[in-house]
Image (tube, rainbow, N blue to C red):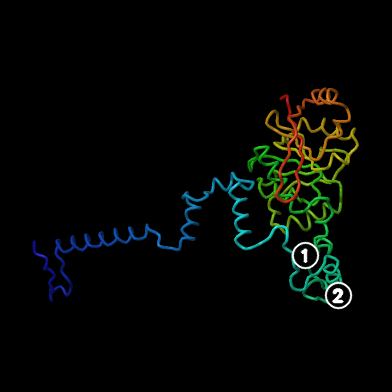
Amino acid sequence: MALSTVTYSPAQKGIVISIPTLVLSVLIAAIMLFFLLSSLSTCSCPSSLQSFNDNNNGGDGLGEVDRKERISATEEDIEWIKDQIQANGLHMQDNVLRKGINPRTRAQQLQDLIQFKGISHYEGPESDNHTALPCPGELLVEEHHSNYGEPWAGGRDVFEFLAESSRLSPNSRVLEIGCGTLRVGSHFIRYLSPEHYHCLERDELSLMAAFRYELPSQGLLHKRPLIVRGEDMDFSKFGSRVVYDLIYASAVFLHMPDKLVWVGLERLVSKLKPYDGRIFVSHNMKFCSRLGGEECTKRLTSLGLEYLGKHTHDSLLFNHYEIWFEFRRSKA
């Protein structure tokens, strides 16, 4: 087969290419494309980027499904933290924390906000302040994080325990009785689908902190949680058809009269998913123990509730154990 078949024809003023040459050109182009695609399939990027791609595309790392299913820290996570503390020469008991540059207490920060209207030292008249939605200074300095007996960070621990004990998924529905300033609730709101977190709270200051600071500061406004101001265990504003996978009260029943707790339980039974749904109560259940074992069991049974047991939860952020009591709806 002759390969040198390209000729110039003055009459046609163009290039005449024979069929064999055209076929050879196409073949060469196909071979070059094959080697190009083969080279692209092998990533020569840095190992950290390759690991990122593996994790997000079903590689050997932690895949998307695993990230959605995992809630609490694993034993490997705990060991990793210990290794990092040791590797960096940190001492759990002896380390003395030092304040950073220009440390300010919350009281000092609040005074600055009142005097200077924020870090910009804005001094214009109030009528010219075009802030779309002013936030109380007490919230901006996070005074509400000190309004409760437990560390603010411990809310993550409570969420992990309850979410895993109840086998929640993002499509589950959760009702919290007394969510306060969303120390725990913010983690549920972030995890659950929009509108799937509900709360009954009586304190106005706590509600303002939840709506005006916690939800916007954590980027959770789009989750549209249903947080209702109310007391006396009135759940009428949540609708009659909603059924919850988890209902919990963290140190709330502790401060209620026993009679009101029983009224609340009676109203909550029909809102709890039969058999699979769970009610968790923390700290103690004096409303039940003061009746005596048999009497409490009888009253729970009459409501259609079954006591499943006491849980002792080892916390990463409380520095002590959390006590929880578990119930379920025993009738459909």
The disc labelled 1 sits on which kind of residue? Ala
Identify whether 265 is placed above or below 44: above
Report the disc number at residue 146.
none
From the top left corner, tell me how far across and down residue 10 is, in percent: 13, 76
Q: Position of residue 299 (x, y in %)?
A: 84, 25
Quadrant hosting residue 241: top right
| Residue at the spot of label 1 | 132
Choose between 315 and 135: the one closer to the eye.
315
Q: Picture coordinates of residue 180 (x, y %)?
A: 81, 49
* Quarter that holds the C terminus: top right
Q: Residue at x 73, y 25 (%)?
A: 330
Q: Quadrant of the N terminus?
A: bottom left
Cα gap from disc 2 to disc 1, whole angstroms: 16 Å
Q: Are marks 2 and 1 in contact (CB under 8 Å)?
A: no
Disc ID at residue 125: 2
Badge 1 marks a residue whose secondary structure is loop
